[in-house]
Amino acid sequence: MTAPLHEARPTANGRALPDTQQGMRRRNLARVMHAVSAEGPLSRAAVASRIGLTRAAVSTLVDELVRWGLLEELGPERPSRVGRPGSALAVSGSGPCGIGAEVGVDHLAVCAVDLRGEVRARAVRHGANRGRAPKPVVDELSALVRRVAADAEREGLWPAGLAVAVPGLVARDGHTVVHAPNLDWHGTDLGALLPADLPPTVDNEANFGALAELWLGDATPPDFLHVSAEIGIGAAVVVDGQLLRGKRGFAGELGHVPVHPEGPDCACGGRGCLEQYAGEEAVLRAAGLETREEAVLRAAGLETREDAVGLLARRAGEDHEGVRRALHDAGTALGIALTGAVNLLDPETVVLGGALAGLAPWLLPSLETELAGRTTGPACPVTVSRLGPEGPLLGAAHSVVRAVLDDPATVAERV
């Protein structure tokens, strides 16, 4: 796992650890875990040097982390010119893992990620969820969670938690979906529907996508605006390495920013929203593929949303005039909507993620033209996430892993 070492104080159940001897010990355990996770394998002496503790203190902490199965000793390091070689430490490939799940408009996905950041088990179900009642959808998701957890256990792992990404507004209680327009869900308590033995944390898919970009992206700065563009369009703002959630936790609804106030009706109840011009279905419709979509996808042997984007990319690469025009117009709409956010927030960069990241070569020219012509300051660079549509699912799973790294003492009672 290559996440950077953060000096932020770890938390327990969302609260800062107290300034007591026990709280200090737990913070130091977290510092050791983050150091080995970011830079390992490392010897005890190397860890002590990096976090500013004595070697004796680090040894005591390491012994606990090894006993809990969070760190493992790989054997002696290569001999140095002075002194005896130390034993190299690495994050364990067994023990706790993070279970991430995603509820999409046309799919369900679950994965297990170990403390090293490696995906060890995965399950996906493709099929429409729009308009379905929450319970049968969540029942299917729960079955996938149980399957992935069982596969992970066969790999020597056990689930430390479950995080679920959804395309909608999530209350600050971390389990209630207040409004998911593209699913037509309202006031849905997912925590009450998911397996009771693994209490979940639920969050907006764009937030998890942004966290994945922060933790796993290629040199992503700590201040950026992440756009998660698929059937719907969400966004998340990261400031100084932290999500900007807003008072009610609803920040980032870029897809429902009006681009043309008198435009078509949107599922959110508004008109002319960005999703009506740059969402995946809107682009297919503008490209003239909507009425033929099922037949085209079936003929091509394609069934997933990624493949729909692949179809658009192939047509654009073949100079299909309608597809290219639709993507140009979608990029323009994205640029208009992003202008307000960039002028208001002044991010260091904009990151385009989600499934539509695969269409970046045709979206970016008009998007960047709008940003350059409408922003008041220097042009804000736009980069493309290498995580693509995997971002929300990976972000969900890694959020559980990060919770273990931030407060490893929480797993002691499970050992």
Image (cartoon, rainbow, N blue to C red):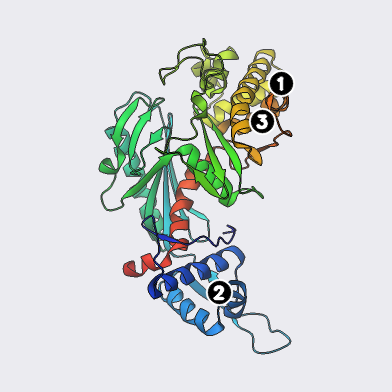
Residue 405 vertical position relative to residue 212 in the rendered view, above or below? below
Give the left or right position of residue 135, taking residue 333 as reference: left
Q: Amino acid at mark 2?
A: Leu
Query: Seen from this angle, which residue lies furthest bottom?
Result: 83
Q: Amino acid at mark 3?
A: Ala
Quadrant of the snapshot with the C terminus: bottom left
* Sequence-first tag of 1 and 2: 2
Residue highlighted by disc 2: 89
Residue highlighted by disc 3: 360
Q: Amino acid at mark 1?
A: Glu
Q: CA distance from mark 1 to mark 2?
A: 52 Å
| Secondary structure at numbered mark 2 | strand
| Secondary structure at numbered mark 3 | helix
Q: Position of residue 395 (x, y in %)?
A: 49, 47
The front one of 178 and 120 is 178
Q: Position of residue 63 (x, y in %)?
A: 46, 79
Residue highlighted by disc 1: 318
